[in-house]
Image: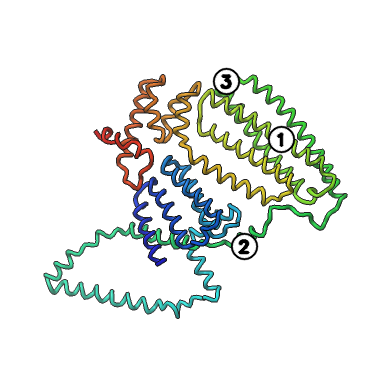
Amino acid sequence: MKQLAIIIASLLFSILFYDRSIGLNLSIFSLITIAFLVFYNPIKFKNKTILLHTFAYVLTAIFVFINHSYLSVIANCAAFFTLVGTVSETSSSIYVQWFNGIYTTIAGIIQRNFDKNEDTQKVNWKKDIDLAHWAKLIGIPLVFVIVFILLYKNGNPIFNDLISQINFDFINIQWVLFTVLGYYLFNNISKPIQVEPATSLDLKTENELYKSDHFSEEKLKKEKQLGTTLLGLLNLLLVFYIITDVMSLSSIETTKASELSNHVHSGINTLIASIIIAIGIILYFFRGNLNFYAENRTLKNIAFSWIILNIILIILITIKNQIYITSFGLTYKRIGVHIYILLTFIGLVTTFLKVLKIKNLAFLFRRNTQIAFVVLIVCSMINWDATITKYNLTKAKAYDVDYLIKLTDRNAVILYNLKDNIVISQENKNRIETKYNNYMLHLSQRDWQEFNYEIVANLEKFDKTKD
C-alpha cells in the first residue's frame, strides 16, 4: 500500500512539473507532500510544532500561486525542507531541521539502507535478493525473444507487417526519467532521517550559560576593567557620531539623488561595521564566567547602552532611507536596506536578551535563524514589483519609468492601468502597452499546471489579446 502511494505521488509529480514552468503545480505539490507525510507519519502530525510548520508550508504555497515570484518559490522550498526536517526531529533547532530536510530529500533512502546494514535487521543481498537469478530470469528470455522476432520477421511477411506496426514512440524516455526522479524524491521523504551527530548534539545543547569550575575573581576583575574601558570609550565615540549624523540629516538636500544615495550607503556601511564589532565585543566579554561575576553590573549597563546607541543609529539610517524612498521612489535595493535594518535591529535585541538572561551562542543562533525564516515567509507574501510600481507612480515625488518597465512582468497590469494617469513620453507608453500585451499573450498560452492568480484574474482579457 505504501509503495503504491509513492508510485501515485511520483506520477502526479510528473504530471505537475514535466515540461512545465512554476505556477499552480507547486501549490498542488505542497498539498500532496503534506498528505504524503501525514500518510507515512500519522502520529508525528499530532505535534504542535509540526502542525505550525505545516501551516507555514501551506501559506507559502498560497503565495506562490498569488504572487508567482522567485522569493515566494524560495520561501516555499525553505518551508518544505523545514517541514521534512521537523518530521525527522521535532525538538531540534531550525537550522538543523533545514540540514535534515535537505539531506533527507537528497539521500534519504540511501541513508536508510545504510542504517539497515548496521542494525540487526541486516539486508543480506545474496540471500534475500538474488540479483544474479533475477538478471538471468529477465535478461536471457528477453534476448532470445528479440532474436527469434528478428528471425521470424524475415520468414513471414504477415508477421513482419504486424511487428512493424508496433510503435513505441508513445514512450517518452524523459517523462519516464522524470517520474523516476519523483519516485526517488517521495521515497526519500517518506521517512525523514536525522543527520548524526549534528541532531543529537543540537538536542543536548541548551540555551543557558553555566558557571564553569575555573572561576578566578582576579582574572575576571581585570577582564571587567578592560571591557568597561573599551565599551565606555566606544559609547562616547558613538554618541559623538550620532550627534554629527543628526546634524547632517537636517542638511540633506532631498533634490539631489546622488547626495541622498551617498548618505544612505555610507550610513549602511558604517552600520554594518558597527553592529558586527558591537556584537562581537559583547559576545567576547559575556562568553563565560564574567556573566556570574558579582561586580559586573557596570559593564552590563555599558553594554546595554552600546546596544541602545546602535539602535538609535539604526533609526537614523531608516530615516535617511525613507527620505530617499519618498523623494525618488522604491527600488529593490532600498527595500533591501529596510529589511537589513530590521534584521540588524532583531540581532541587537537578541544580543540584549543574551546578556540580560545569561544565554549562550546557541540561543542567539537559534532565535535569529527562526526570525530570519519568518521574515522570509512574510516577504514572500508581497508582490514587490507591483508594490514598487504602484508606490512610485502614486506617492513618490520622482521616479524612473525605465526602471519600472524593466522589472518583471508581475507589474505589467498595474503599469498598463496607470499609464494614462502619469506624465511620460509616448515612447514609454508604447513600451508599457507592448509589455502588457506580451504578458497577456504569455499567460493565455500557459497550461493549467502553470496557472497563478494573475491568470485567473485576467481570463476574460485573453480573447482580446489573441485578437
Work out whether residue 67 or residue 157 is closer to the camera in this orientation and state it: 67
Q: CA distance from mark 2 to mark 3?
A: 56 Å
The quadrant of the picture occupied by the C terminus is: top left
Where is 413 relative to 450, above or below? above
Residue pictured at 38% horizontal, 65% vertical: 4
Residues marked 2 and 3 touching at CB (< 8 Å): no
Where does label 3 land, which residue? 254
Q: Which residue is mark 1?
A: 308
**Residue occupying the point 31% across, 46% down:** 447
Disc 2 versus disc 1: distance between alpha carbons? Answer: 39 Å
Q: Is 329 left, or right, of 10 in this rendering?
A: right
Which is in the foreground here, disc 1 or disc 3? Answer: 1
Q: Earlier in the sequence, mark 2 or mark 3?
A: 2
- Under circle 3, the secondary element is loop
**Label 1 CA crowd tier, 10 Å (few <14, some 14–19, many 20+):** some
Type of amino acid under label 3: Thr
At which x and y percent is residue 289? 79, 51
Label 2 vs label 1, nearer the camera: 1
Disc 2 residue type (three-letter): Pro
What residue did someone put label 2 on? 197
User: Residue 103: horizontal and vertical position, in percent?
Assistant: 52, 58
Q: How is the image coloured?
A: rainbow
